[in-house]
Amino acid sequence: MSKLKDILSPFTAWNNLARDPVTIKDPINDRPGAARYRGFHQNDIEKCIGCGACESICETGAIRMVEVDEVETKEGDSGLRPEVDYGRCCFCALCVDICSTGSLTLSNEYIWVDEDPEAFTFVPGIDKKPWDNNQDGWKKPEPDYELNIKERVRMPEMQAEERENSFVEIVKGYSREQAIAEADRCIDCGLCQATCPAHMDIPDYIRAVREENLKEGFRIMYKTNPLPEVCGRICTHKCEDVCAMGHRGDPIAIRWLKRYIADSVDENEYQEALQQENPKDKDKSIAIVGAGPTGLSAAYYLALMGYSVKMFEAQPRAGGMMRYGIPEYRLPYNALDQDIDYILSLGVDIQYNTRVGKDITLDALHEKYDSVLVGTGLHAGKSTRIPGTDHEHVYQAVDLLREFSKGNEIPISEKIVIIGGGNVAMDITRTLARLQNQKYGQVNITTTSLETEDVMPADQEEIDEAREEKVNLKPGWGPQKIEIENNKIKGLHVQRCLSVFDENGRFNPQFDESQTDFFEGDMLIEAIGQGMDISYLSKSIRDGLDFTQRGRLVVNDYFQSKQEWLFIGGDIIQGPDVIHGIANGHKAARGIDMYLRGDLRYE
Amino acid sequence: MTMKKKNDILSRLFGKEHRPQENKHNQPADADSGKSSDAGKGGGTGSVPGSDSGASGEAHYSDHNHNIAPDHTEDKYPRNGKDGKPEVDLSSGKYTKVWQGPNHPGVTGNMSLELTICGDEIVDAKTHVGYLHRGFEKLFERRLYMQVMPTCLRMCVPESDTNEYVFSEAVEELSGIEAPEKAKWLRMLVLEMSRLQMLLRVVPGQGGAFGLGIGVQWGMYVRELILDLFEELTGGRIYHMYMLPGGVRGDLPEGFRERAIKTMDEVYRFAQRIDDVMFNNSVFKKRATGTGYIDPSWVDRFGIVGPNARAAGYNRDVRKDHPYLLYDQLEWEVPVLEKSDVYTRARIRWMDMQVTADLIKQILNKIPEKGSFKAPTPNALNWRIPRGETYVKAEASRGEFGYYVVSDGSAYPRRITLRGPSYTHAIALLEKMLIRTNIADVGAIMVSLQTCPPEIER
Ligand SMILES: Cc1cc2nc3c(=O)[nH]c(=O)nc-3n(C[C@H](O)[C@H](O)[C@H](O)COP(=O)(O)OP(=O)(O)OC[C@H]3O[C@@H](n4cnc5c(N)ncnc54)[C@H](O)[C@@H]3O)c2cc1C
Ligand code: SF4
Ligand code: SF4
């Protein structure tokens, strides 16, 4: 039997009559989503780079990257923007959490009424919405919440004490585990590929590292770059500058991954890995002047197309500035030779110690060959032309580097002053520091530049490493004159440099004459840039070429000059760096092929 | 914990009259299995609860049962065939087949029962699932691990967080990553909040199954308050998507602790009110007491877990038996009752509800201020999990809930399968329990098992 209590107690429910109702009268207006609510998407269109990480993570396939009129494709921006389909979206916000730039967020808005079902597929930030400026809603949780690793895998390197007087390569290269971990960070956006002058298929070769399919990675690299050992070490890596991961962390170490793949294939495995032959099935032959990256790259692709290729090189070995400029501790000769040897093994003929314009004329090559490519680079050091630069102990950086690379003795005094703030200046500085260490057991070098450190063109790591190697860096000073006493150099007078470029971006340094200094030294080196020597262009050839007002040679997209048989590329035209040379060489090779088939005119 | 302390905790929560009896079935399984050798096979007159369950079961039954019809003559009920299932001769004209569900207010989700009735009494029952099959386990094989997170939680809609937790933990285990301490506390908080909102539905829902709607509205109101807290903390009300491999997706918002603790008062108040209108309600008592009886001897044979087992005297709770996260740093006692009928099971969930509120308060006071809430994890787009397999379990409001995860070393799971309590409760056990019950009680019995069809079909 039920107790009396069990009959009466339910009536306590009547208590509610005396209580206030708990319902919200107007939920649409009175009930905003919580500050963290995962509501409708917002995208900061200026910040978004169209990397597509949001599309890749979206589990429901709600995101599609689409072209939008408002955004232009440019370096580091695919021009695409995410379009979201609310018929699919589950509002998980993983897209927000993984967004490379932090541009994508969710507002806390959650009510959207529309009679057109198509309206619910929209491009946030482009298709204007009432919640676009809503500050609340889901943002990527900060600070230590990431769906990726922001820091790159550190590259093992030689410590300063070990490398001080050695030319052994500083960078040691990734191990298998390190390479895979670094490759894992890639989000496969392809912004790098678009930016790389050679358009190397970077995401694909990074995937090859991840999947441990290194021979495949090697083949992928050779499709656009026959100098991977070189580029894997010293490339200027434009790709890394635009890497999506660089927006909130370190860019992927693309260069080191390239090196990892290149190093993983042994010299005697190249043939097997690449499975290429030089068919030599075309009756046309091509002359290439200069065996730098431009010439070598063109030779490689032309040989594979079946042309006979003959190279003419002024120096005793191939490589151009890769051999005679870049120091061994950054690019060891065996790595360079590995790349070059494979190219030459495809049946490319090369004649060393032959300076075109002196030993043989360009007109003679024109006569004998169906087409000619010149990639002679920039080898004439420029001078500041300040008083004293005509002294015999004032040298050009590129000349010293070339002589040293050839194995010749170069002058090394106890106190050296170097002028220049770029990478060439760092290369000569650090080369001489090593030689001073070997000869005198200590370093006494002052390297000075017009630019202050924040705008010095040299890579930061070069600057840091030079300091570690005990070089005295003096950025922000303009050279005035060289102090010479009894025909001996005493040092360099400098004054404070306030700015290097004017508001139009033109070189126009401004100085504060009241601030001066004096850097002691008994030998002085200029490393302020190089010019080209194109004296091999005879008057008749030259007259048939286009030059810009500032005296630059003009070529078309395929590096074909107005003299249609003559193609020109590399430092003379673009860059200056190795990868532009490679890219130019590749493009020129295709251009030459088209020209010889009658499909290409200068225009 | 000392016995005194343990009793203190329980009496603080439930007062003297609700103190659970000392549990007789503390140790799992084997102790009981001898008692009921033929029960599972349903031999003899077989399927009447109590009559087939050996000495201790019988004692429970006769002691407690008020409204299950006494054993009838042989010819009213069909005899069991070799498979232990009743052999129904429909041509006899004595029996009618009716379907309950898949759409029916008395079913818990999309599943249906094929009932054979004689008058208004059920003589045979068969559960049918398949109305809700979404193929999740197959979908996972085509998802990156991180993408499994927003999918897996749909395997049990009303208590999605347990999915998130066991999945995340399994991935962490396989890849050798440990979530930071703060993340562990936050995970516990969310798991307990999840349990609480679930119980706020099912406790009054038991009354609802008998037509007592009022408690359901009250429960829903308090549940909404919990969902508000969820919204603040996780950004979502139902699908929280808060835990992911490596940790959680956010720290406590400002002032959350205080607001949450205050909300727990509402829970206690609700517990009191539902006690008045439901548990001390003569109609409810009459309908629920003795209905849907689970004999203790069935517990192991049917794989009964959670409150359904604890109401039958078994002290089983994954949080205590195999402590995970930081549960061993909390003080609480697992409610255990005896005589598992609809009333007792509702009662034990009512106790769970308050224990949970208590745990939430403890957790809130223990979440460290400092520290990170997510361990570094590799790029979600390329995260390959080392080859291996693992089973990770947790105590959901319905009992042990686990994922078995197999990785072949790739970025996609080779296999993820769910072991949820509803599978056994809603299929084998329910079929057995329904026999010789009144058709009017079917809904209430299903609710009392707290079955969740989405979890059966995945
Ligand atoms: C010190 C230094 C460091 C550098 N470091 C880097 C670096 O880290 N990364 C990077 O990307 N780039 C670097 N560069 C730049 C890079 O080396 C050049 O941009 C690149 O080598 C240019 O390629 P190229 O084919 O145009 O010419 P070059 O490499 O200069 O090759 C031209 C070749 O033509 C030959 N030649 C010239 N005139 C004639 C002629 N009349 N007849 C026959 N042969 C001739 C030359 O001997 C030379 O072998 C560096 C340059 C220097 C000087
Ligand atoms: S919120 Fe989730 S489902 Fe929606 S677009 Fe973003 S990733 Fe896709
Ligand atoms: S992840 Fe972010 S930056 Fe990349 S496309 Fe999507 S919204 Fe833009």
Image: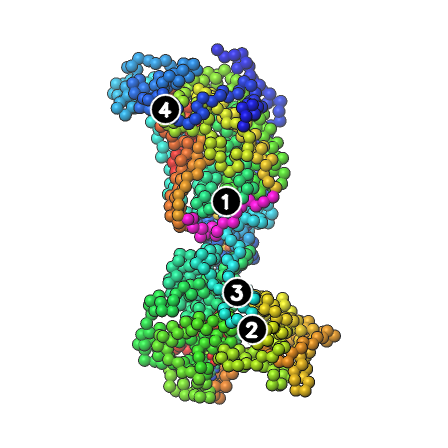
User: For numbered disc 3, what is the local secondary structure?
Assistant: loop
Left or right side of A552 for B43: left
Q: Are marks 4 and 3 on the same chain?
A: no
Q: Are marks 1 and 4 on the same chain?
A: yes
Tell me the kind of residue under disc 2: Arg
Q: Residue at x 63, y 68 (%)?
A: A453
What whole-number distance in Å separates the C-alpha atoms at marks 1 and 4? 39 Å
Please state the extent of the stretch shown in magenta in the rendering: B370-386
Using a 10 Å C-alpha cutoff, classify the residue at mark 1 as few (fewer than 14 neighbours), some (14 to 19) or many (20 or more). some
* For discs 4 and 3, the disc positioned in front in the rendered view: 3
Q: Examine the rendering and report whether any part of residue A372 can be seen.
A: no
Q: Find disc 1 in the rendering and name its residue.
A: B178
What whole-number distance in Å separates the C-alpha atoms at marks 4 and 2? 84 Å
Please give the chain letter of the residue carrying mark 3: A
User: For numbered disc 2, what is the local secondary structure?
Assistant: helix
Residue B333 location in percent, x, y? 52, 27
Q: Find disc 4 in the rendering and name its residue.
A: B33
Please give the chain letter of the residue carrying mark 4: B
Q: Find disc 2 in the rendering and name its residue.
A: A434
What whole-number distance in Å separates the C-alpha atoms at marks 3 and 2? 14 Å
Q: Are marks 4 and 2 on the same chain?
A: no
